[in-house]
Amino acid sequence: MKNSVKAVIITGGLVMVLLIGVLVWTVAQRAESENDPKPQVLREESHVLDDGGRDGVTVVEFLDFECGACRAVYPEVEQLRQKYDGQITYAVRYFPLPGHVNSMPAALAAEAAGQQGEFEAMYHRLFETFAEWGEAAEPTPEVFRALADELGLDMTAYDEAVADPATTERVRRDRSEGTFLGVEGTPTFFVDGRMVALTGPGDLERAIVEAQSR
């Protein structure tokens, strides 16, 4: 009897330890999930330039303002935005690439403008003036500051935003999430959450049309 009782006690103790271990693991997993949410193609803080409404196709571009390919595809994107106005939700996210000295400064300029409600205006000006600063040997923050001044921004607020570590972190969050989503270069487009393989002209529009038919 004594051996049987001892065995029951030991077995019960092991079960209790196992249950406690499962409970601790579950709590840890829940905390990790809350602190490291699943990557999303579009977030509430993302810059939405066009809203296609509830039934619209969602197009998200991860871009680097100093990327020549992003500049090259910019006119096509603008044509599609106009052609499908009211039918697509178009949003932009940052993905500054290493090796481009003005990638981060340009993104900071766009984000600082966005804090004053002028993201889209700066978005256009950055691509329109690409030849003045793109692929420069040294960063040209003075060029971006001049653009901000031309847009009539509050320059004190602009300077503070550019210097604020929170602005840099905002850009890096996009870059980090893009990496988790499989973005490796720019421009990278997602249409209704699906990454689009751009192999030639018309690929993005075809993806939009296909999404509309689904």
Image: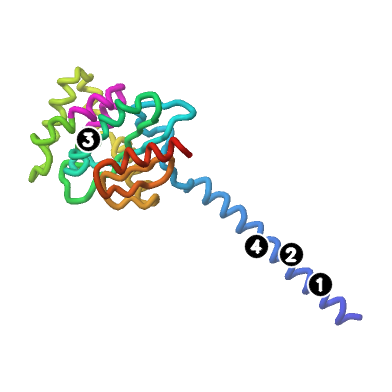
Residue 9: x percent and y percent?
81, 72
Specify the amino acid type for callout 1. Answer: Ile
Q: Residue pushed farthest right?
A: 1
Circle 3 SS class: helix
Q: Is residue 91 above or below residue 8?
A: above
Mark 2 and mark 3: Cα distance apart in space: 62 Å
Q: Identify the residue position indicated by label 3 in the image.
A: 74
Q: Which residues are magenta?
A: 109-125
- Our reading of the magenta stretch's main secondary structure is helix
Circle 2 SS class: helix
Q: Which residue does the image show at 29% across and 47% down from the upper left?
A: 198
Neighbor class of circle 2 (other Cα within 10 Å; few <14, some 14-19, many 20+) is few
Q: Identify the residue position indicated by label 2 in the image.
A: 16
Disc number placed over residue 140 in the picture, else none: none
Q: Nearer the viewer, mark 4 or mark 3?
A: 3
Q: What is the quadrant of residue 134 in the picture? A: top left
Tell which circle, 4 or 3, labels the residue nearer the N-terminal end. 4
Tell which circle, 1 or 3, labels the residue nearer the N-terminal end. 1
Mark 4 and mark 3: Cα distance apart in space: 54 Å
Residue 2: x percent and y percent?
89, 80
Tell which circle, 1 or 2, labels the residue nearer the N-terminal end. 1
Q: Is residue 11 above or below residue 116?
A: below
Q: What is the quadrant of residue 143 in the picture? A: top left
Neighbor class of circle 3 (other Cα within 10 Å; few <14, some 14-19, many 20+) is some
Tell which circle, 2 or 3, labels the residue nearer the N-terminal end. 2
Mark 1 and mark 3: Cα distance apart in space: 72 Å
Disc number placed over residue 21 in the picture, else none: 4
- Tags 1 and 2 touching, CB below 8 Å: no
Q: How many marks?
A: 4
